[in-house]
Image (cartoon, grey):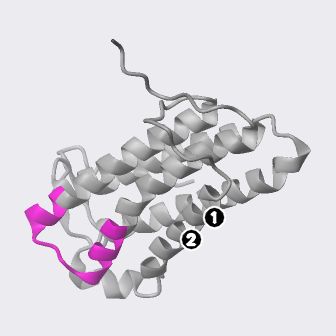
Amino acid sequence: MTKIYTKTGDAGKTSLVGGKRVEKTCAQLEAYGTVDELNSVLGTAIEELRVAAVDADRTMQRDDLIKQLSAIQNRLFTIGGILATEPENCDKYWKDSPVVSWTEVLEAKMDEYTESLPKVQNFILPRGSKCAAQLHVARTVARRAERKMCQMGEETAREDEFFCNVKKFANRLSDFFFIAARYTLFVEKKDETYWELEK
């Protein structure tokens, strides 16, 4: 069995896809490291949803949401790979990845899920169930990942098509998690909690 540790990063550097060595503190690593963190947070949300108490008439909706979240997990791995690849190598490793279509998929699902939800009356507090709260965590980490990508773009002057499509998807992803958190409460037949201004 191959050992998990390589010792090649002991001095504070790591390799990008293609072999280039960079500092572990660079914006590029911050970007795809945050995407990796988001993937782990999303995994927790999926497992919470799997064990949630759901009535028989909502199991189809629950299963569909799990399917969508699982697909996003897989896509986040691809995104991490794209962010870890220098622009000149992206065609070599990622040209067959349909990243450009992923944003449209998210938008269509958000529209579909929103049809089942009540209109938002005020700011919604991130709670209601374990899965809903975890999806709100995913929402905030997705926003941070997007900020890290923007920082990476500024520092590396990266503007290739792969990177632009990934940023667009990341921007839409946090919106999706907000809708998914609300939809989770619909699936679990639980109420939303609205923010109230203290007087």
Q: Are marks 1 and 2 in contact (CB under 8 Å)?
A: yes
Please tell me which residue lies in front, 63 or 28: 63
Amino acid marked by disc 1: Glu
* Relative image position of residue 20 (x, y in whole percent): 20, 69
- How far across and how far down the image is residue 187, in percent? 73, 44
Location of mark 2 (residue): 108
| Residue range (magenta) | 151-168
Q: Main secondary structure of the magenta part?
A: helix
Residue at image mark 1: 112
In this view, the residue in front, 162 or 93, is: 162
Work out whether residue 134 can be spotted: yes
Q: Residue at x 38, y 44 (%)?
A: 141
Relative to 62, does residue 130 appear above or below in the rendering?
Answer: above
Of helix, strand and loop, which one carries label 1?
helix
User: As drawn, is 48 to the left or to the right of 28?
Assistant: right
Residue farthest to the top? 199
Q: Residue at x 54, y 36 (%)?
A: 134
Question: Left or right: 55 with respect to 72?
Answer: right
Q: Give the secondary structure at mark 2.
A: helix
Cα separation between marks 1 and 2: 6 Å
Quarter-of-image position of residue 163: bottom left
For the C terminus, the quadrant is: top left
Asked if residue 152 is among those painted magenta in the image, a careful observer would answer yes
Identify the residue shown where x is 60% and y is 41%.
Answer: 45
Q: Amino acid at mark 2?
A: Ala
